[in-house]
Amino acid sequence: MTRTRTRSWFVVAPLALSLVGVSIRARAWGTREHQEIGTASYLAACARVERAISDGADQGVRERFEIACGPREPLARLYGDATAIAGDFVGHPSEVLSAHGAWRFSSRRYYYLLALENSEHFNPLSTESWREFHEAALTEAIRAADVQGLPRVDAWEQAVRESAYADHLLQDSFAAGHMGFNRRGSSAAAAKSFHDYWNAHGRVVYDRAGQVWTAYGDGKLDDPANAAGSRHVRDAATSSVYDIVLTFVLGRRHPELGLETWRALPFTIEAPALLVDTEGLIQGHATSRDSEQIPLAAAVLPARKDTVGHAEIWVAAPFSGDLTVAATANVQLAVPILPAQASFGAGATLDQPNGGHSAVAEFGLLAPLGLSADGLVSHEAEAAFSLLFGKPVATIIHVQYQGSIELGTALLVVHLGLAEFLPHARTGWYTALGLGWTFSAAGGGAFAR
């Protein structure tokens, strides 16, 4: 038994890693897009500060301006890099531009864990987190203005790290795939699929100043269709970093600048729910027709996995009998008339007690049990039966727990449960190990009125 398990692991592990490698990119903007926004906003902020300070500025103001905006292009590039790393690759501002943070940037594992599970990247939590870290950056900027020499440089660099972390979250707040659903209530795979759909298709958002535009996400920053969205996120990012630089250079806070950025953030959204695939096919469109504006904080419904494909090897046996081993492929999908997710599958046995082989057909219903590890692990209960078309035809009825490790749209699935063997009634056990892929999500939006 130990040799069999070891051999199975060496088969499954590379497949799982290969799925992970190609599936996980749950970002609001690509790394280069975060770099581009961060760099451009820093350049624009320094130019705006330069216009704001008078020719007669005292020596302290000129010195602080030189620290913040001296060799402008390199400093702006450094800020863009810090903005790209923050949040997706490091979990705290102190790690931004550190040696440890740079190492994490080269390790995709940290991106997988941080960007997928971290609900602070999703609006409205991202706007709350931006306020928190932006305030911390302002505090450090004031402290830097009040000290002299190298301690001033140290404090200013800490302000820059806090600001870069805040601005990464601010930029995330403008991405279509990072709004309109309850990230904390959604599994990682459902969130990833939901995120990808809306980043590509766009959604209509409004800020507190009454401006309206269609927001997109990852890969769309410089797309002509996203011209308005690109302008809004760049303007808000510039306003945010301008607040930090001006506070440091002049040595005093400017509360109106924080409010300027806050008013520019997406506030309400047209948040139609994503329909399940089967309902979308019947109705001829993928979303509900609801175009009512709702506050982003009211988009409390989670995304859920809709269409999921699995390839599995399962083993079942009576408590006092020999093993039946089969390989199956199945699809799980939501059907509007059914109260739970339906599963349909087919395959063949690899080993049976009688030495023969049979075709296998399967049907089951799944019910969610909950999530753990911030949605990286989902838990479900399944009741199913497997028909073995041999001589004679046999049926295995099984009720089991299904746990899925969700890395992007890829799933590593484990089943454990009890089985009943027919036509000669015998009770036993059932277990399975498989790889899955989430093709679409459904849900999101607000409670129906």
Image (spheres, helix red, strand yellow):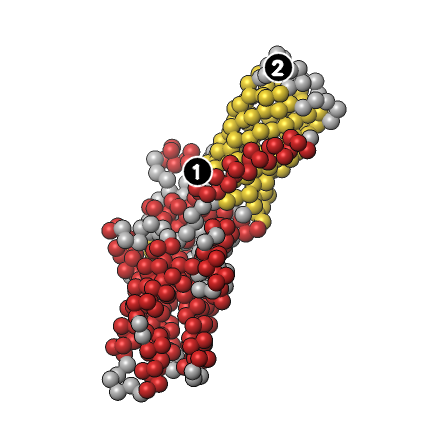
Percent from the top left, x then y, of residue 287?
A: 37, 42
Residue 198 appears in the figure: yes
How far apart in space, not on screen, are marks 1 and 2 (Cα)?
35 Å
What amino acid is at disc 1? Phe
Q: Residue at x 62, y 24 (%)?
A: 325
Location of residue 436 in the rendering, given as x and y in whole percent from the top left corner: 51, 36
Give the mark nearest the N terminus, 1 or 2. Answer: 2
Most extreme residue toward the top is 391
Name the residue type under label 2. Gly
Q: Quadrant of the N terminus?
A: top right
Kindly indicate the quadrant of the structure image that contains residue 153: bottom left
Q: Secondary structure at mark 2?
A: loop
Q: Judging from the image, what secondary structure is the residue with disc 1 in?
A: strand
- Name the residue that disc number 2 marks: 356
Q: Is residue 133 left or right of residue 46?
A: right
Q: Which residue is more in the foreground, 257 or 153? A: 153
**Mark 1 lies on residue:** 439
